[in-house]
Image (spheres, rainbow, N blue to C red):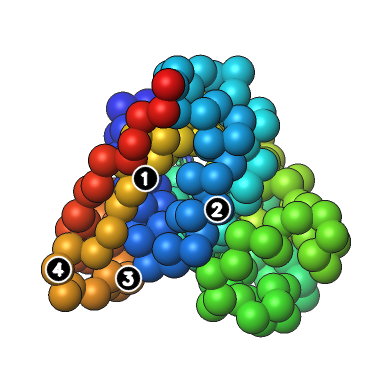
Amino acid sequence: MIFRGTDTVAVLMEWILARLVLHPQVQQKVHEEIDTVVGRSRLLTEYDLTEMVYLTAVIKEVLRLHPPGPLLSWARLSVSDTLVDGYHIPKGTTAMVNMWAIMRDPHVWVRPLEFNPERFFNNCNNMDISIWGSDLRIAPFGSGRRTCPGQNLAMTTVTYWVASLLQKFQFGRWGESSIDLSEMLRLSCEMANPLMVRIHSRKVCS
Ligand code: HEM
């Protein structure tokens, strides 16, 4: 619980901030949504999160391109001989699912390498799809019996923290440095080079 529940959340937040710095127009839209739903004169509460539809789409798009847990079923064995898609899987095999590759598959996604949160809105290619494991085009928390038990907690925590940070701050590039999206698979799939940003305070309106 400690390994799966802390590292993943921290890593996902770092990827989200990296994408918001890389795509300032997306950050601007998240700021506008927070200003509309919450404003700047009171603190955000958990009740506000259900109205943050654009931020939710941004987080889904980050999970699609940068899943903290890219390989599913690390510790599972087939209990009997079976056939999957014509392939014979003998009893005792460990077969991992490469969710990272599925979520970048051009047969599944339109322009898969493009960062485009809009793809998760209903009016855009009917892509209003679930990330909770019922749709295997995007299952960043796994699927089935051994799906992530912390997925709701994870999404609530990440949305709350990112929204709280963005209510108060604007994130920009650190000097001339570019955002390096290289990955490193450690306990989770992390940024190979930690994110460096410049943080500007946003005006508090009464
Ligand atoms: C962004 C955050 C998170 C991501 C992306 C994530 C992702 C995953 C994935 C992909 C799995 C494997 C599922 C499979 O093999 O089908 C998993 C398992 C697990 N997760 Fe999460 N997780 C996150 C947060 C959390 C949190 C907050 C907790 C607990 C507080 C948690 C607890 C666990 C546990 C205990 C398992 C193992 C379940 C089992 O093997 O039966 N995770 N998670």
Q: Which residue is mark 1?
A: 13
User: Which label number is shown at residue 181?
Assistant: 3
**With 107 as the anchor, is 142 left or right in this view?**
left
* Above/below status of 163 relative to 117: above
Marks 3 and 4, how far apart at CA: 17 Å
Task: List x then y, in percent, for residue 110.
Answer: 70, 77
State which tag comes first along the sequence, 4 or 2. Answer: 2
Q: Residues within 10 Å of mark 4 (few under 14, many from 20)?
A: few
Marks 4 and 2, how far apart at CA: 23 Å
Q: Which residue is mark 2?
A: 29
User: Which label number is shown at residue 26?
Assistant: none
State which tag comes first along the sequence, 2 or 3. Answer: 2
Q: Secondary structure at mark 3?
A: loop
Amino acid type, callout 4? Gly
Residue 79 visible within the image: no
Task: List x then y, in percent, for residue 74.
Answer: 45, 51
State which tag comes first along the sequence, 2 or 1. Answer: 1
Marks 1 and 4, how far apart at CA: 21 Å
Q: Residues within 10 Å of mark 1 (few under 14, many from 20)?
A: some
